[in-house]
């Protein structure tokens, strides 16, 4: 694969980014993906500042390649996390869940490449205006926190491509080389992949959760809790309780009480499959094996090239 705007921007081999995912992407996963030629991301949303500090120290020891940190702006101690990425001279930051104007200049002034995650044309334009280096456009298929409009990746990528000029990274529903090629055909310069890397050896997700991910059937997830923060979950007992609450016309306050605190940790990090929140994308249904992250990168890139070769064959040319 030769260079493109994303490989040049980050100084990486493949335009393949591993998503920052709370409780699943610590330094072990991020370093493994970066060492394999992609861009690994530490998901800082679930880390207290001292934990992020530890992960940054360990990540720098585990890889000499570029890596990134995801900073969700709804995180309560965001100022401390920003200070940590500055202190550790993290080369790339992906901001999400907030206004891209808030941190972009400060991070860019420190020489950090900034990417903002969006789920609509409106916010992609806002991110471009804020001066970010690239935008992630994440479709409805994605796991975890998600946009409210339910725009699928198939629709979102060409729409954002038309609207912005800076590099575009597609996310949501991509777990394979064929998916990566499809996203590039729609106009993306690179892809961000989450779910596939949850089911990796290096992911910090609990073994129970990883096994559940590779057994998730087609239709096994749903976007819910739109009144709080929309989130795509596996349909487990906790999800069914939420559905029951909706049937009983629960108020926002009642939904908040039902969710409580720390359910994502309980499900994804501690492996409580009944009471925990299990956040994964629709594409989990095609993931069948827990593999080392480097092998996942290799498989995706190899399938990408294979599919590209097939699609340039005669049977696809209609003259
Ligand atoms: P681990 O639990 O894997 O490691 C804790 C300690 O044990 C480290 O000092 C580590 O050493 C050592 N260790 C780990 N595996 C082995 C082994 N096989 N043999 C010998 N020693 C071992 O934690 P992490 O290093 O992965 O993470 C650090 C902290 O961050 C932990 O408290 C963890 O719970 C937390 N964490 C939080 C996440 C979040 O999203 N909030 C995600 C992932 C972790 P070494 O320095 O060599 O790794
Ligand atoms: P909750 O409010 O339910 O719980 C907070 C969780 O975050 C606890 O498990 C807590 O760990 C951990 N945590 C880490 N650092 C802090 C801190 N400084 N203050 C308070 N809690 C902290 O939130 P969620 O579990 O849904 O989300 C965790 C964080 O990640 C939140 O800041 C959220 O905004 C952010 N986030 C969540 C996403 C999602 O998809 N759920 C996506 C992106 C960001 P402990 O139990 O050890 O105290």
Image (spheres, rainbow, N blue to C red):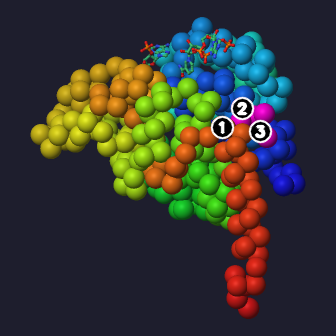
- x, y percent for residue 280: 46, 41
The residue labelled by disc 3 is 36
- What secondary structure prevails in the magenta region? helix
Q: What number is the disc on residue 292?
A: 1
- Residue 249 is one of the magenta-drawn residues: no
Name the residue at 76% across, 61% down.
305
Specify whether 210 is left or right of 56: left
Q: Is residue 38 visible?
A: yes
Q: Looking at the image, which residue is at 75% across and 84% down?
A: 314
Q: Is residue 2 left or right of residue 114?
A: right
Q: Nearer the viewer, mark 1 or mark 3?
A: 1
**Mark pair 3, 2: CA separation:** 6 Å
The reply to whether discs 3 and 2 touch (Cβ–Cβ < 8 Å) is yes
Instruction: Give residue 265's position: percent from left, percent from top.
Output: 42, 23
Identify the residue at image location x=39%, y=52%. 217
Q: Is mark 1 within 8 Å of ligand 1?
A: no
- Magenta-drawn segment: 32-37
Q: Secondary structure at mark 1?
A: loop
- Residue named by callout 2: 32
Task: Depth check: give the residue in front, 23 or 189.
Answer: 23
Choose the circle earlier in sequence order: 1 or 3: 3
Is residue 34 found inside the magenta-colored segment of the image?
A: yes
In the displayed orientation, state which residue is furthest to the top: 50
- Give the percent coordinates (x, y) of residue 266: 38, 23
Q: Are marks 1 and 3 in contact (CB under 8 Å)?
A: no
Q: Residues within 10 Å of mark 1 (few under 14, many from 20)?
A: some
Q: State the SS at label 3.
A: loop
10 Å neighbourhood of mark 2: few (<14), some, or many (≥20)?
A: many
Number of marks: 3
Q: Quadrant of the C terminus?
A: bottom right
Mark 3 neighbour class, 10 Å CA radius: few under 14, some 14 to 19, many 20 or more: some
Q: CA distance from mark 1 to mark 3?
A: 10 Å
């Amino acid at each position: 694969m030769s260079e493109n705007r994303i490989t040049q921007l980050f100084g990486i081999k493949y335009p393949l980014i591993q998503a920052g995912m709370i409780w699943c992407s610590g330094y072990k996963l991020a370093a493994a993906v970066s060492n394999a030629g992609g861009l690994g991301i530490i998901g800082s949303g679930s880390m207290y500042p001292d934990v992020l500090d530890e992960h940054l120290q360990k990540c720098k020891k585990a890889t000499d390649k570029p890596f990134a940190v995801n900073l969700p702006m709804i995180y309560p101690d965001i100022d401390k996390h920003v200070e940590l990425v500055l202190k550790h001279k993290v080369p790339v930051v992906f901001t999400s869940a907030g206004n891209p104007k808030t941190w972009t200049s400060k991070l860019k002034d420190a020489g950090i490449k900034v990417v903002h995650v969006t789920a609509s044309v409106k916010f992609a334009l806002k991110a471009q205006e804020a001066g970010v280096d690239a935008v992630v456009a994440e479709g409805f298929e994605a796991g975890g926190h998600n946009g409210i409009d339910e725009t699928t990746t198939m629709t979102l990528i060409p729409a954002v491509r038309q609207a912005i000029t800076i590099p575009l990274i597609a996310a949501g529903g991509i777990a394979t080389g064929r998916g990566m090629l499809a996203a590039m055909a729609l106009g993306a310069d690179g892809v961000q992949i989450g779910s596939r890397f949850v089911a990796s050896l290096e992911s910090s997700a609990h073994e129970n959760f990883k096994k559940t991910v590779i057994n998730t059937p087609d239709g096994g997830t749903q976007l819910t809790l739109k009144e709080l923060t929309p989130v795509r979950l596996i349909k487990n007992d906790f999800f069914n309780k939420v559905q029951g609450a909706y049937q009983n016309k629960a108020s926002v306050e009642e939904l908040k009480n039902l969710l409580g605190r720390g359910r994502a940790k309980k499900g994804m990090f501690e492996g409580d499959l009944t009471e925990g929140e299990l956040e994964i994308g629709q594409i989990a249904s095609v993931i069948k094996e827990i593999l080392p992250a480097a092998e996942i990168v290799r498989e995706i890139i190899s399938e990408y090239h294979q599919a590209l070769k097939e699609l340039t064959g005669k049977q696809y040319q209609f003259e």
